[in-house]
Amino acid sequence: MFLLDRRLISICVHYYGAVPEMNSYEKLAATLDKIPNGFPAVEDGTHLKILEWIFTPEEAELASKLKLRGETLDEIAGRLRIPKKKLNQLLTTMLSKGQISSWISKSAGSRKYGLLPFAVGIYEEQLNRMDKEFAQLLEQYFKHGFKKISAIEPVIFKVIPVNQSIRGELEIYPYEQAEQLLENAASWGIRECICKKQKSLLGQPCSYPTTVCMAFVPNREHAFDDDELTKPVTKEESLRLLKQAEEAGLIHCSYNTQTGHYYICNCCTCCCAVLRGVNTLSNPREYIKTDFVISVNADLCTGCGTCIDRCQFRALSVPEDVCVPNTTRCIGCGVCAMVCPESALELIRKEPAEKPPPPENPMDWMTQRAVFRKVDPSDVL
C-alpha cells in the first residue's frame, strides 16, 4: 500500500483542503494489503511497479473493488454500476491474466469472480506471463516486502516433515503428513515452480527439480482438466513426485492450517521467496511453523558429514566426531536424515511447542493474522 504519512496528510488538508486521490494502482495496493496475507509497501515503490506490470489501470481499478468471497456478474455490475457486457469482457480478460479467481457457485447457480491475495494468489498465477523484467521487479520487492510478510503470525508456511525421518513412536497428525493429504484428495495436479522460474530468468537456474508444485482438491474430480498452468496427474503419480522431491532434498511446505489444504510446495532456499528470506536470518525456525527438530544419536553417528550438504539451512556441523544440530536454524524438515548411512538422525517433536497449533482452517488463519496485523479486512471479504 502506498500510504502518505499523517504529517503529509495534515499539510495537504491544511493547504489544499483534501488529500490527493490515489490512482488505480495505489488503490489496489491498499486493498491487497487489507487482506490478512498482506502486500506491504516498500520505500522505492516497487510494489506499485509490480502491479503496473500485471494490471492495466482499468483492470487495477476493478480489482481494487472486488471481494474475496466472490460475486456473480450481476452482483458486481449492480454494485459498481458497470454495464454487464463491458464488465463481462473485462473480467474474462482479467481471469485469463491470472489477476482474479473464478468458480461455479452451486448456491448462486452461476459463476462468481473474486479478489485474489497477492501471495498465495496473483503472484503464482503469473507463471506463463513472467518475463525477465517482471522477475527483476519481484527480486527487488522480495528483498524488502517479503521479510515483512514473513514476520507476521500466524506464519504462511508450515513445514511438513519427511515421514521416514520421524521417530516411529511419535503421534503424527494428518496435517503433518504430506502423503495423507494426497491420499485424501479427489484430484491432483503438478505445475512448474514460479519461484524457480523467476530465478532462472535472472540467470540463476535451480539445480533441484523445477516442476514440483503440487495442487490437489479433496472433493472434486477432474479439477485441473481446464487449468492451463497445472497438469492433471493421478494419485499414484503425485505420490511418486512427492517421493522424488524428498529424495532430491526439497522441503515440503503447505498452508499453515489443520484443514483446507490445496497445495504442497517442494521448496529450496535458493529460490523460494519465503524460505530464502528467512534463511538469511539467524533464527529461521521462528518464521516457519514447525513442531519437529532433528536429533542425533551420538552412539550411531560416525561424523561422516554426509548430512551437512543436505541441510539447506546450515543447521548441522561436525565440530569433532559427532554431528551437532543448531536448533535455532533447524526447521524440522527431515531431509538430512534420509541420507544418513548410519540412521543416526531422526526427527523428534519439540517439547514444549514453540508455536501454538496451526489455525483450524483458512478463515481462522485469516482472522488471527488480521488481528496480529491490526487490519480490518471486512470491506474486502
Image: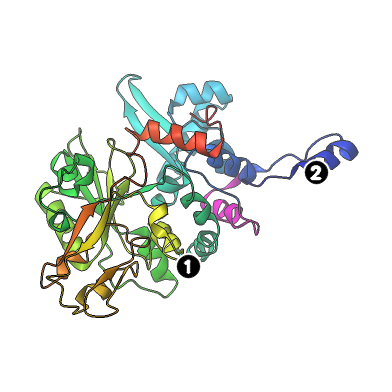
* Amino acid identity at mark 1: Lys
Reading the chain from its start, which is encountered first: label 1 or label 2?
A: 2
Answer left or right for 61 relative to 381. Answer: right
User: Residue drawn at (33%, 64%), measured in percent from left and top?
Assistant: 268
**Pointer 1 residue:** 132
Q: Is residue 114 visible?
A: no
Q: Nearer the viewer, mark 1 or mark 2?
A: 2
Residue 161 % position (x, y): 22, 53
Above-or-below relation of 209 to 123: below
Q: Is residue 353 visible?
A: yes
Q: Nearer the viewer, residue 221 or 212?
A: 212
Q: Nearer the viewer, residue 83 or 301?
A: 301
User: Residue drawn at (79%, 40%), measured in percent from left and top?
Assistant: 9
Answer left or right for 141 relative to 295. Answer: right
What range is drawn magenta here? 42-57
Q: 10 Å neighbourhood of mark 2: few (<14), some, or many (≥20)? A: few
Instruction: Give me the C-alpha separation between circle 1 and circle 2.
Output: 38 Å
Answer left or right for 358 relative to 370. Answer: left
Residue 332 within the magenta-colored segment of the rendering:
no
**Pointer 2 residue:** 7
* Amino acid identity at mark 2: Arg
Q: 10 Å neighbourhood of mark 1: few (<14), some, or many (≥20)? A: some
Answer left or right for 113 relative to 228. Answer: right
Above-or-below relation of 123 to 111: below
